[in-house]
Image (cartoon, rainbow, N blue to C red):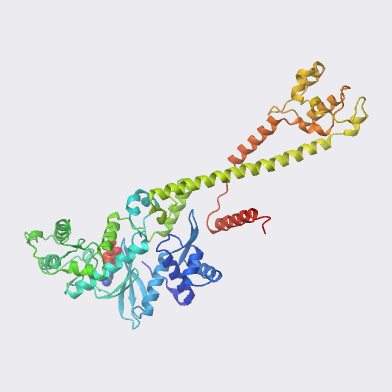
């Protein structure tokens, strides 16, 4: 566990934070925030914002991402940490950040200090960023939620922890003193002790057991159940006093599963004491015997941590897939998903898309298909035009290669234009003239069944020497039959299809696409301006 790298903080200027906040605000309803929106929220012109975003990208405070619909920026975990720290610095709550002292599946815990260098505990909640695969599996769950982003869930977790810390502290429970909260960061008193799981010896196991059971009952009397009361969430001080540090799953005793949670907490303590200190007691608290004396659960709801927030948070805990600190892994998976299945638009959809109604999705799909068809048509027309031009120039070159002078000097040659009905293609001429048959036998066909161009041209020229009518040499370009042309075009098209398209990823691709779009616009308005 290392230190948090906050060295960049001192080099960041007001504009950097302004743009960071703009990205954060944009992310309330966008998975990635387009440059134009960042610029509009920050109130800084685009050029300036682009420069600042580049700086922020360099320091991994934001990340550039592209989605199917648009490209944009998203706040990284580091960027969110910086925003929270900066706000708490300006409130003069936090003055320094030190070593990491705890790493949980839902948080990173650091030692910190206030401006007077008194010790603090900084708990950064990291919650709710599920992997793309999981999103696909849990589509229903995400569809119903308005903002299932990790920013939202981490902030909720922090708000809940802070509210509960304060409420428990006010009622005399042994918890760290709550200092402040900002975004996903809870600042609290640093408890110097050992988590119960690391304690190997206690003076009086029975007394400790009784104190822990008494804590569970006291909380229930105040209307709440811890829900995760175990040796990992209890710190023992030097004088063997216990401090509770973590209560993410705290529920009201009116919760439908309250009895289950209560019994689970009690069983956890009993199992731990039996395993660790070989202590077993005949006596343990029962849910039915608890008499409610307080209404902490109701007061907590009134404190701003609403039922809806609790519901969202509990669902995330139930999902139990917290990949917030595995950004690199997540990015790799996203790339994998995109690479594996380009047509599977589900994988590459943003959270926003996932929240769309089915009708919207269908419409989008239809629109997309219509666009794709148009593009395909345009491509075919374009490719045919260029191929035709290429073919024409080829044929012209072939013709130029024919030695006309030599032909003219031969007997019976007359350079007079033939009426169209006299003109016959080489393929047809096979049946026309028996004399020609012998000559045609000698002709060699290439692998595609094409007669060599030179030979075809020569054959046509020979026909012009027939005394019944002179023919134009220029018309011999028609030695390519319509079928030949069609076959060639089909072959070219097939080859083009087989060509592997080079996929450019990241910002470079976005630049390319923008250029292409611009080119299309210019082409469309050609002649108008
Ligand atoms: N106030 C505090 N003072 C000292 N150490 C703390 C404090 N809060 C947390 N820690 C340390 O950080 C570790 C993780 O904290 P915590 O249990 O709150 O995080 P978490 O993410 O909820 O963990 P998990 O859910 O995996 O149990 C603890 O085991 C403890 O060592």
434, above or below 259, in the image: above
Query: Is any part of residue 237 visible from this angle?
Result: no
Relative to 456, is 81 above or below? below
Query: In the rendered view of the protein, which quadrant contains the C terminus?
Result: bottom right
Count the marks: 0
Q: Report the residue at 74% width, 31% height from top.
A: 480
Expressed as whole percent of the image width and height from the top left, the position of residue 484 reads: 69, 31
Residue 416 screen position, x and y as percent: 88, 30
- Front residue of 239 and 421: 421
* Any part of residue 458 in sight: yes
Task: State which quadrant residue 123 falls in.
Answer: bottom left
Question: Along the line of sight, which residue is nearer the eye, 74 or 146?
Answer: 146
Q: Residue furthest front?
A: 528
Q: Residue furthest top?
A: 434
Where in the figure is residue 216, as x and y percent of width and height? 14, 65
| Quadrant in which the N terminus is drawn | bottom left
Q: Is residue 501 left or right of residue 412?
A: left
The residue at 43%/58% (across/down) is 328
Residue at 38%, 79% (x, y): give it.
Answer: 90
Residue 94 x %, y %:
35, 78
* Horizontal relation, residue 336 to residue 306: left or right: right
Tell me the quarter of the picture where residue 435 sits.
top right
Q: Quadrant of ligand 1?
A: bottom left
Q: Nearer the viewer, residue 104 or 334?
A: 334
Looking at the image, which residue sits at the far bottom?
116
């Amino acid at each position: 566990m290392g230190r948090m790298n906050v060295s960049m903080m001192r080099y960041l200027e007001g504009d950097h934070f302004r743009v960071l906040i703009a990205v954060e605000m944009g992310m309330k309803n966008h998975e990635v925030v387009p440059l134009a929106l960042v610029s509009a929220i920050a109130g800084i012109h685009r050029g300036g914002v682009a420069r600042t975003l580049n700086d922020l990208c360099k320091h991994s405070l934001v990340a550039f991402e592209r989605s199917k619909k648009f490209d944009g920026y998203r706040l990284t975990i580091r960027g969110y940490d910086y925003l929270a720290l900066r706000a708490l610095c300006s409130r003069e709550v936090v003055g320094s950040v030190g070593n990491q002292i705890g790493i949980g599946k839902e948080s990173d815990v650091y030692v910190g200090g206030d401006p007077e260098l008194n010790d603090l505990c900084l708990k950064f909640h990291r919650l709710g960023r599920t992997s793309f695969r999981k999103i696909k599996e849990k589509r229903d769950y995400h569809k119903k939620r308005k903002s299932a982003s990790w920013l939202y869930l981490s902030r909720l977790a922090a708000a809940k922890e802070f509210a509960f810390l304060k409420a428990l502290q006010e009622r005399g429970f042994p918890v760290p003193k709550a200092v402040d909260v900002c975004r996903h960061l809870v600042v609290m008193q640093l408890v110097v002790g050992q988590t119960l799981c690391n304690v190997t010896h206690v003076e009086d196991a029975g007394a400790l057991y009784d104190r822990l059971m008494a804590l569970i009952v006291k909380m229930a009397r105040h209307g709440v159940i811890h829900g995760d009361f175990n040796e990992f969430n209890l710190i023992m001080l030097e004088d063997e006093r216990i401090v509770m540090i973590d209560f993410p799953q705290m529920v009201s005793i009116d919760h439908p599963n309250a009895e289950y949670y209560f019994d689970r907490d009690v069983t956890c303590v009993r199992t731990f004491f039996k395993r660790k200190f070989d202590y077993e007691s005949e006596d343990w608290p029962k849910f039915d015997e608890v008499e409610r004396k307080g209404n902490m659960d109701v007061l907590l709801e009134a404190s701003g941590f609403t039922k809806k927030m609790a519901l969202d948070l509990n669902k995330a805990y139930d999902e139990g897939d917290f990949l917030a600190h595995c950004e690199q892994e997540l990015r790799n998976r996203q790339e994998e998903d995109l690479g594996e299945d380009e047509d599977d638009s589900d994988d590459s959809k943003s959270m926003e898309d996932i929240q769309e109604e089915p009708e919207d999705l269908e419409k989008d799909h239809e629109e997309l298909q219509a666009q794709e068809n148009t593009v395909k048509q345009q491509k075919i027309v374009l490719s045919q035009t260029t191929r035709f031009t290429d073919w024409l120039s080829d044929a012209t070159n072939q013709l130029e290669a024919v030695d006309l002078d030599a032909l003219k000097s031969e007997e019976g040659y007359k350079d007079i234009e033939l009426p169209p009905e006299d003109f016959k293609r080489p393929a047809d001429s096979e049946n026309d003239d028996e004399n020609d048959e012998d000559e045609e036998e000698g002709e060699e066909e290439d692998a595609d069944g094409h007669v060599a161009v030179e030979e075809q041209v020569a054959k046509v020229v020979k026909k012009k020497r027939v005394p019944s009518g002179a023919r134009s040499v220029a018309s011999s370009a028609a030695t390519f039959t319509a079928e030949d042309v069609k076959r060639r075009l089909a072959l070219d098209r097939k080859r083009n299809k087989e060509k592997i398209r080079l996929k450019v990823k990241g910002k470079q691709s976005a630049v390319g696409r923008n250029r292409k779009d611009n080119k299309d616009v210019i082409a469309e308005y050609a002649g108008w301006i």
